[in-house]
């Protein structure tokens, strides 16, 4: 036992060195030093012929503890920087005169996979997961991954795995030659030991991956692949440099010398781990993990296998389509046969759209259809686990539905409303099962928006909360828990963002210029492209609800009704703010200008204000659209609607398309003095109306000269 490693030398002459830092065997400086000490201890022993490196408890290692990334580091010498990558992994492990074989089960991510790559052979289980995941934290592999992975799997696949932080299972790793053999979990160490001895006996190859070249192709081919990757990265992420740094380091090793590139890699890693981008991405990583951390999570979730959906609301057909694609049995209830057939046809159309864009196979499509059952009554509800009510009706209708459900469904069935029109307390007023009533709000139901808002009441049981969060996870949606509070939450933040963009367009700023400015900032879609995707009908309905409840906080767009009167509804009709071809590709519409002119508000402005609007820079447009959304996020936080401010960072990334490398909208506000945000909002409020009025949360922080947000340390401490 050497601190964080366990060593066992067998009678066969094979030493097994196991990383031992449960539960995930995360790497730290102490773990790496312990591993080095163990390896240096067994290498000179006469009774050791070969070494197997593995992890305890069927987990190799999930990589470095992310809490070490993002903080400022002291200046180090070149030798200090290369201690682990060059002195240990390259000059001690890879250059050893005794073979090393990695035995991999469970995760082998980031630095853990880099240890694996330095070994002379690799054996894994079929269920093992392997990947260089560093770029999701704004850094690059720092222990030789940029040099060894391309030489084992080929340059195109290595670039895909590194730049996309893509994980592969053991089966795919074998096909890629990332591992040399697959073994059952209970035979893994035995197979690895035998493989190591075979290398000693020269019946298996002794491979030093750093100098393999057979998978790299010609220099001309490698340059072409790298140049293509560089252009794609610049197109997708023009505001970040760490992927380009990674490509340059990979290129250096191929064009020049891999050992020299190891030094460049470790120096670049040291610089990037201290960057603001790294801090933002680490914050977002922890924020995502926090969304499911509630006090009730010590309970075990119950299975939800059969789901009923009631009504043909705005999004019910897409809800059902996604449920059956996730292998849930689904009962769809409608009021009459015509509505039922119409809704089933919508579901079929949605499923075919998923197939068309490669989101499912033909076999998956056919299976999904067999899981759907349409009904006109409640006779089939006796064994459902979850009911989602999606009616666009009155409060009394919803109350009737929930009263019927209580009588006809199993006693543990959870009742959910997808509507934010009425409070859950009112919806469940006629029932005695308010402990099982919850709100489930979906967003645009696009694969690009993997988010679900879970609305809880004070009466909701802990078990129901755990069950619904687990349902969201299995549904591949990140859950954001909010209180039952007047429709506030993710929707109100997103709608404020879209209202701000619409208001600016109605003041005469070009729609496409606005979208381009927000895209250049890093948003996944511009706000008007996003409204097209949502659909004008859904956008107008959500806007109406929020405006009726909180008229002082939301803007009533004039432009949307003008476009709807011209039979434009967004992407679904191939005409919205953009035109769409048969493949769904968007392009600017030259006719749009005549509609924006009809809705313009410039006649109410002074000549100086009009002139200022015409001269708006991209950064000023970004602030005029995002500061109101931040303002609303701060209201939601101060009203106690979300469990923690970082939940809105996650929501802004997943629902708004806010760039994760900026940490989320609340975290991003750390880039500004609160007084600056307050003064801007106040200035716009005086010029353009109450919509921009800064909230008390921002005003109070401005008075104290503190940042709007300061969360990263709190999030990291909560993980420890």
Image (cartoon, grey):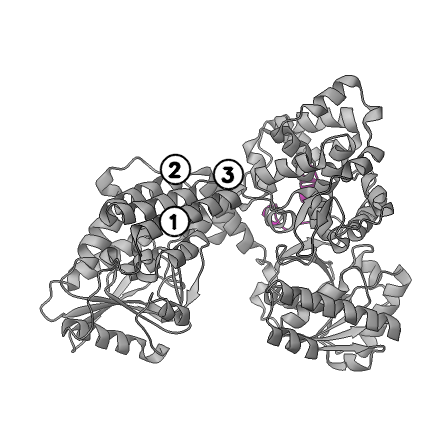
Depicted 35 relative to depicted 590: above or below: below
Q: Position of residue 132 (x, y in %)?
A: 39, 56
The residue that label 1 is drawn on is 224
Residue 645 forms part of the magenta stretch:
yes
Q: Which mark is residue 239?
A: 3
Could you say whether the residue bearing mark 3 is in a helix, strand or loop?
loop
| Relative depth, front residue between 578 and 652 | 578
Residue at coordinates 74% horizontally, 39% vertically from top-left?
590
Q: Quadrant of the N terminus?
A: bottom left
Q: Position of residue 493 (x, y in %)?
A: 70, 44
- Characterize the local packing of mark 3: few (<14), some (14-19) or many (20 or more) Cα atoms within 10 angstroms: some
Which mark lies nearer to you, 1 or 3? Answer: 1
| Relative depth, front residue between 276 and 697 | 276
- Horizontal side of 146 relative to 710 (left or right) equals left
Q: Is residue 94 visible?
A: yes
Alpha carbon distance from label 2 to label 3: 22 Å
Residue 431 lies in what quarter of the image?
A: bottom right
Residue 10 lies in what quarter of the image?
A: bottom left
Residue 25 forms part of the magenta stretch:
no
Q: Is residue 640 visible?
A: no
- Horizontal side of 654 relative to 560 (left or right) equals left
- Characterize the local packing of mark 1: few (<14), some (14-19) or many (20 or more) Cα atoms within 10 angstroms: few
- Characterize the local packing of mark 2: few (<14), some (14-19) or many (20 or more) Cα atoms within 10 angstroms: some
The residue that label 2 is drawn on is 72
In this picture, which residue range is highlighted in magenta? 631-647
């Amino acid at each position: 036992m050497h601190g964080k490693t366990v060593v066992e030398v067998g009678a066969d002459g094979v030493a097994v060195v196991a990383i031992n830092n449960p539960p995930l065997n995360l790497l730290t400086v102490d773990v790496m030093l312990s591993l080095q000490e163990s390896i240096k201890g067994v290498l000179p022993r006469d009774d050791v012929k070969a070494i197997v490196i593995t992890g305890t408890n069927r987990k190799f290692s999930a990589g470095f503890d992310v809490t070490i990334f993002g903080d400022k580091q002291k200046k180090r010498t070149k030798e200090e920087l290369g201690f682990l990558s060059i002195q240990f992994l390259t000059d001690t492990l890879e250059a050893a005169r005794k073979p090393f074989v990695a035995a991999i089960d469970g995760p082998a991510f980031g630095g853990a996979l880099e240890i694996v790559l330095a070994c002379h052979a690799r054996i894994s289980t079929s269920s093992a997961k392997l990947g260089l995941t560093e770029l999701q934290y704004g850094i690059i592999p720092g222990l030789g991954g940029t040099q060894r992975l391309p030489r084992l799997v080929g340059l195109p696949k290595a670039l895909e795995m590194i730049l996309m932080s893509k994980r592969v299972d053991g089966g795919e790793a074998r096909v890629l030659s990332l591992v040399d053999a697959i073994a059952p979990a209970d035979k893994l160490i035995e197979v690895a030991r035998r493989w190591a001895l075979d290398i000693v006996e020269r019946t298996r190859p002794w491979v030093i991956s750093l100098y393999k070249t057979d998978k790299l192709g010609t220099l001309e081919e490698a340059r072409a692949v790298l140049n293509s990757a560089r252009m794609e990265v610049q197109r997708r992420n023009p505001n970040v440099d760490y992927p380009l740094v990674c490509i340059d380091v990979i290129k250096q090793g191929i064009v020049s010398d891999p050992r020299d590139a190891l030094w460049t890699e470790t120096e670049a890693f040291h610089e990037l781990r201290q960057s603001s981008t790294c801090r933002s991405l680490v914050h977002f990583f922890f924020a995502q993990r926090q969304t499911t951390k509630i006090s009730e999570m010590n309970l075990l979730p119950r299975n939800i296998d059969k789901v009923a959906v009631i009504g043909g609301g705005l999004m019910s057909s897409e809800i059902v389509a996604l449920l059956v694609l996730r292998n849930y049995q689904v009962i769809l209830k409608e009021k009459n046969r015509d509505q039922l057939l119409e809704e089933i046809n919508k579901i079929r159309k949605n499923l075919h759209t998923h197939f068309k864009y490669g989101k499912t196979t033909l076999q998956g499509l056919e299976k999904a259809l067999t899981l759907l059952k349409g009904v006109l009554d409640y006779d089939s509800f006796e064994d459902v686990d979850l009911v989602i009510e999606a009616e666009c009706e009155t409060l009394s209708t919803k109350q009737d539905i929930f009263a019927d459900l209580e009588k006809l469904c199993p006693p543990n069935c959870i009742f959910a409303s997808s509507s934010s029109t009425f409070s859950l307390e009112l919806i469940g007023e006629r029932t005695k099962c308010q402990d099982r009533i919850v709100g489930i709000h979906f967003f645009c139901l696009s694969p690009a928006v993997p988010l679900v808002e879970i609305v809880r009441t004070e009466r909701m049981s802990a078990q129901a909360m755990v069950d619904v969060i687990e349902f969201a996870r299995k549904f591949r949606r990140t859950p954001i828990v909010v209180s039952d509070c007047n429709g506030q939450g993710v929707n109100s933040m997103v709608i404020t963002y879209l209202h701000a963009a619409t208001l600016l367009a109605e003041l005469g700023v070009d729609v496409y210029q606005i979208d381009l400015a927000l895209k250049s900032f890093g948003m996944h879609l511009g706000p008007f492209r996003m409204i097209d995707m949502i659909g004008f009908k859904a956008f107008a309905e959500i806007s109406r609800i929020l405006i009726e409840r909180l008229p002082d906080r939301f803007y009533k767009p004039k432009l949307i009704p003008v476009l709807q009167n011209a039979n434009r509804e967004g992407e679904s009709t191939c005409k919205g703010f953009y035109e769409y071809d048969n493949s769904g590709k968007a392009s600017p519409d030259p006719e749009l200008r005549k509609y924006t002119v009809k809705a313009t508000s410039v006649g109410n402005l002074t000549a100086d204000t009009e002139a200022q609007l015409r001269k708006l820079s991209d950064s000023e447009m970004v602030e005029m659209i995002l500061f109101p959304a931040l303002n609303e996020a701060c209201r939601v936080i101060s009203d106690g609607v979300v469990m923690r401010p970082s939940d809105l960072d996650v929501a802004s990334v997943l629902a708004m398309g806010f760039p994760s490398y900026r940490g989320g909208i609340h975290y991003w506000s750390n880039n500004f003095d609160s007084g600056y945000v307050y003064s801007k909002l106040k200035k716009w409020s005086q010029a353009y109306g109450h919509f921009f009025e800064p909230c008390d949360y921002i005003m109070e922080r401005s008075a104290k000269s503190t940042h709007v947000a300061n969360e990263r340390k709190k999030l990291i401490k909560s993980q420890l």
